[in-house]
Amino acid sequence: MIPIHFKEENCIYAKDQPEYQPLPAHKDETGIVVTCWQLTTEEKKVIAETGIIYISLLTFNLPLQPLSVTVENPL
């Protein structure tokens, strides 16, 4: 899965941090951040076969923030 550019993006996280992959995003005035990801053909096959997706978050031992995963653009 790779993060991709999308029409509503208005910022790029980690743009100048070589240790991270740049993350195109849309951030609104309330602090909600939306990103868009593209699956590879192989990932699509695995999801079709298993119906399972794993999500890993780097919390740096801070409280976990709410997360929403969707196939529809929430913007």
Image: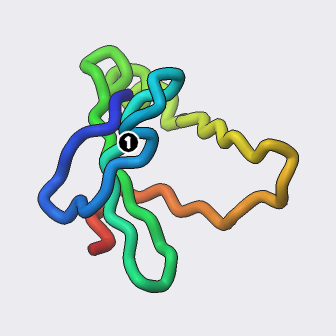
Please report the residue visible at 34 percent of the width from the left and 21 percent of the height from the top: 45
Q: Give the quarter of the image for residue 46.
A: top left
Please report the residue visible at 66 percent of the width from the left and 66 percent of the height from the top: 66
Q: Point out the image quarter for the N terminus.
A: top left
Viewer-closest of 57 and 45: 57
**In the rendered view, would you say 27 is above or below 12?**
below
Q: Residues within 10 Å of mark 1 (few under 14, many from 20)?
A: some
Residue 13 x/y as whole percent: 42, 47
Viewer-closest of 43 and 11: 11
Residue 49 x/y as whole percent: 43, 25
Residue 22 x/y as whole percent: 37, 35
Viewer-closest of 52 and 25: 25
Please report the residue visible at 48 percent of the width from the left and 56 percent of the height from the top: 69
Please report the residue visible at 45 percent of the width from the left and 40 percent of the height from the top: 14
Q: Given the image, on which type of amino acid does mark 1 rest? A: Leu
In this view, the residue farthest toward the front is: 16
Q: Point out the image quarter for the C terminus.
A: bottom left
**In the rendered view, would you say 39 is above or below 9?**
above
**In the rendered view, would you say 34 is above or below 75?**
above
Colour scheme shown: rainbow
Q: Which residue is mark 1?
A: 23
In this view, the residue farthest toward the left is: 7
Q: Give the quarter of the image for residue 48.
A: top left
In terms of secondary structure, where does tag 1 sit? strand
75 horizontally vs 17: left or right:
left
Residue 12 x/y as whole percent: 33, 49
